[in-house]
Image (tube, rainbow, N blue to C red):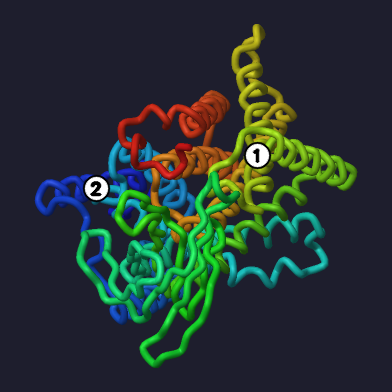
Amino acid sequence: MDFKWNYKRAFLRCGLLSAAGVALQIAAGDVPAAFLRYPWTAVLAVNYLYLLVLAYVFSGRYKWLRTLWDDKACISSLASVLVVVIVSGFGRITASWPFVLILMYFTTVLGIRTIAEISGVGHLFRKTVSGPDRLRHLARTAMHAGIFVLLWAGIFGSGDKVRYKTAVPPEVPVVMASDASGNRIALPFSITLHSFSVPPEADRYLSEITLTEKGGHRRDYDIEVNRPARHGAWRIYQSGYDSSGHWGTVSVLECVKDPWWPVICAALWAVLASALLIVCARLKPEWILLTAVLLAVACIGVYFAKIHGKTLVPALRSAWFVPHVAAYMAAYSVLGAAALVALYLWLRPSHEEPSERGMRLCDALVGTGSALLSAGMMMGALWAKQAWGDWWTWDPKETWAAATWAGYLLYIHLRGTRRIDYHTAFALILFSFLLIQMCWYGVNYLPSARGASLHLY
């Protein structure tokens, strides 16, 4: 009997993976924070990429390999990510085996799909392909490639990051620090604090330090929030201070070493650039200037609110503050308009199906809003790395932002494959808009966010 691959079986595969994750959770407990380190992480990462390439190359010969990256696999894996992120978002998501297995499966599907898209880039430069279509396809491919690299590097590189915290009193060289478990670790250099400024006596937190390597080489740095010191592969962050000890004011610093950051940084910029290209590709030429003006006005408005409002906490004093908030403001506005249009078309008195023009309007609003949302998230990730040393931590705010993003991406992909009726389409738009509300202010009331979220000020 021939095997018939369909959406039911695609979702069944995801369901079996989730069930396996639940069984692992019960049998083995939480996912280990870091069970592999260099060089094994690099070996596994390279071999994983090699297997993805082989899966694409042989998918024409073996149909079951094709089921790893076709539309059914993409839709089912993305929907499963949305569900598992929402379910796990009420607790510690990175400790959940169902989340890890579903995310790994989604990364595999996305990776093979990206390889297929890259292999077909050549046909976009034929004369029969129009400029806007070429730009749209290139931006989509860059978006998929960037997201895949982020997931790939995040999964395989998480065990290679080291993060040590140390309290540095004035004029006393410090050579030891503590990891997340409280273990004492010797640093490859000593840190000597010469001066530490704390508000209200100063307008910022500023540590003036000297780093001395074991060979005797010395270098001076000024460290403040959003401006870490870069010393070789290490970044030293201003984490806080302690004024309770007999030393007086003690500066608390964090030393972070992340060998995968250059790869992740390039991927973040690729996704950010592709998101902006998608916005431009969706707009008519006469609308691009208007959109630029509106974004500029939004940036100016946020900037003046920042200047004339209450004093900002140190983490918010960054060049990323204005564009990050402005992108989210624009995204929420456009996606809010999409929700209103969907609600009107769904509940209007006449029971006729919505016109194609109405559906195209929803598609355009969701597509543009999702691109702006993507840009805001990538800028937030770059900012988080600059301020805290981590570009993504699955903080409760970040978790629900990812759920919102996945909800709108699911709508876009379902509409792209035409495997959705208008009832489901409108319900998904409204559900994703509710996720925005959860991400915006609902997350503040979650027990998992209290005292743990970095996004509560």
Dot 2: within a 10 Å radius of its alpha carbon, few (fewer than 14), some, or many (20 or more) residues?
Answer: few
Q: Quadrant of residue 296?
A: top right
Q: Residue beneath label 1, please?
A: 369
Q: Position of residue 288 (x, y in %)?
A: 84, 46
Q: Residue beneath label 2, please?
A: 16
Q: Position of residue 392 (x, y in %)?
A: 44, 54
Q: Which residue appears farthest toward the bottom when viewing the image?
A: 215
Three-letter code, disc 1 = Gly
347 lies above or below 76 = above
Q: Which residue appears farthest toward the top when viewing the image?
A: 349
21 lies above or below 333 = below
> Residue at image x 62%, y 11%?
351
- Per the image, label 2 sits on a secondary structure element best described as helix
> Residue at image x 36%, y 54%?
103
> Residue at image x 16%, y 48%?
25
> Residue at image x 52%, y 64%?
223
Q: Position of residue 342 (x, y in %)?
A: 62, 23
**Residue 247 located left or right of residue 141:** left
**Residue 310 located left or right of residue 192:** right
Nearer to me, 182 or 97: 182
On residue 130, which mark appears? none
Q: Which residue appears farthest toward the right when viewing the image?
A: 286
Three-letter code, disc 2 = Leu
Q: CA distance from mark 1 to mark 2?
A: 33 Å
